[in-house]
Image: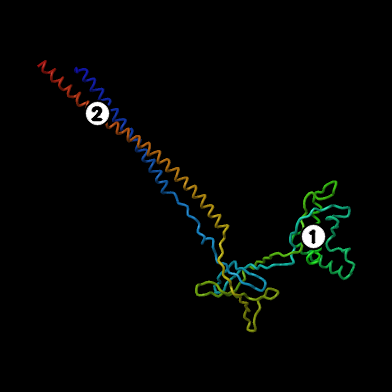
Amino acid sequence: MGMAASQARFLGLTARKNNVEFEGQQINQQRTVLSNQSANYYNDLLGMSVPTPPSVDNYTKTVYSFDDGALTNTVTSLIAEPNGQYTISYLSKWQDDYSAVSAATSIVTKTDTGYAIGATELRALGTLDPSIDNAQKQADRQREEQAWASMLELKYGKTDWVVRYVTDSSTGAEVPYFYAKDDLDRATYDDKTNTSLSNINCYTIGSEQKIEEHIAIEHCKVEKDSSGRFISISLPEVDGDGNPVLDAAGNPVYTTHALTTETTTDQDAYQDAMNEYEYQKQLYDQSIEDINSKIEIIQAEDKNLELRLKQLDTEQDAISNEVDAVSKVIEKNTESSFKTFG
């Protein structure tokens, strides 16, 4: 190889070596960026809070109740007073067998004089009943219907009512069925048949559970067992005007009731919390999966860059060997040239 050719070859190898080194630096820079991205994703994983399933204990509570005759009372609040007594609130529940309740709805016919169901004309509640010819029974019926009218108005807020009676086949008793005059007047009726196009609300006398709330009864006494659980409650007696009843010594009179303890779980609230947990867990799992997928992509890219870097290392070694060989040729050519002119 001539001097000029050796010099050109040396310059070409040097430029190629510099390009390989530059590309290697670029790859190392890219791998550093990928490493930082991967570290950020791992930090995101560490910063995520794992959803915690709800504990049924958080939705379970101890309920105290006591019976007072036909009433079942459930304690809703126990607040300690400075003097060791308690302020208590409770709900009283009982079954009222003579309450106004909803009955099956009816199709009503509009007549010239009012309204009817089938062949039975609806009569204004509290008016004379033409089916009764006994004066005493008539008076009793009107008095009873007036009491029903007051009860219906108090419960449903409507003043004008009509009634029909249906004989109970099993007992022979006449069962009253009530309709609000306002519901009848506002209904839409067929132009040809005069029957209502929709069923009309109906009410009767039946059984219904009643609830009364007693709030903040002060100066109550309670008794606890060795575990700290309440076992009895003493309520101060009051007269008809709500004033406390006192004994001969002027002390309040108490009525003591044994408390029944029951542990109850709010299943609906617990299920709602469990559903929320499942939803949050799905979001958490999806986030983990997304981050892991991104990390896998980064790892694949880094693997490709690592392979390319190894190729460049191999190429760099080959170029270095060839540079050394060309350098020796140039050195020999230089020595030969100096000897020729020496």
Reading the image, the residue beneath label 1 is 178
- Up the image or down, 26 lies above or below 277; here it is above
10 Å crowding of disc 2: few (<14), some (14-19), many (20+)? few
* In the foreground, 142 or 193: 193
Mark 2–mark 1 CB contact (< 8 Å): no
Name the residue at the top extreme: 341
Q: Which amino acid does label 2 sit on?
A: Ala
| Label 2, label 1: how far apart the Cα atoms are | 107 Å
At label 1, which amino acid type do we have? Phe
The image quarter in which residue 18 lies: top left
Q: Which mark is residue 318?
A: 2
Q: Where is residue 277 in the image (x, y as percent from the top left)?
A: 51, 52
Rendered location of residue 288, percent (x, y): 44, 46
Mark 2 secondary-structure assignment: helix
Left or right side of 301 for 119: right
Does residue 139 lie above or below 332 as drawn? below
Which quadrant would residue 122 be assigned to in this image?
A: bottom right
Secondary structure under the numbered disc 1 in the rendered image: strand
Which residue lies at the image location 54% right of the left edge and 60% below the top edge?
59
Residue 135, compared with residue 112, is above or below; it is below
Task: Check the image and name the residue furthest to the bottom.
Answer: 248
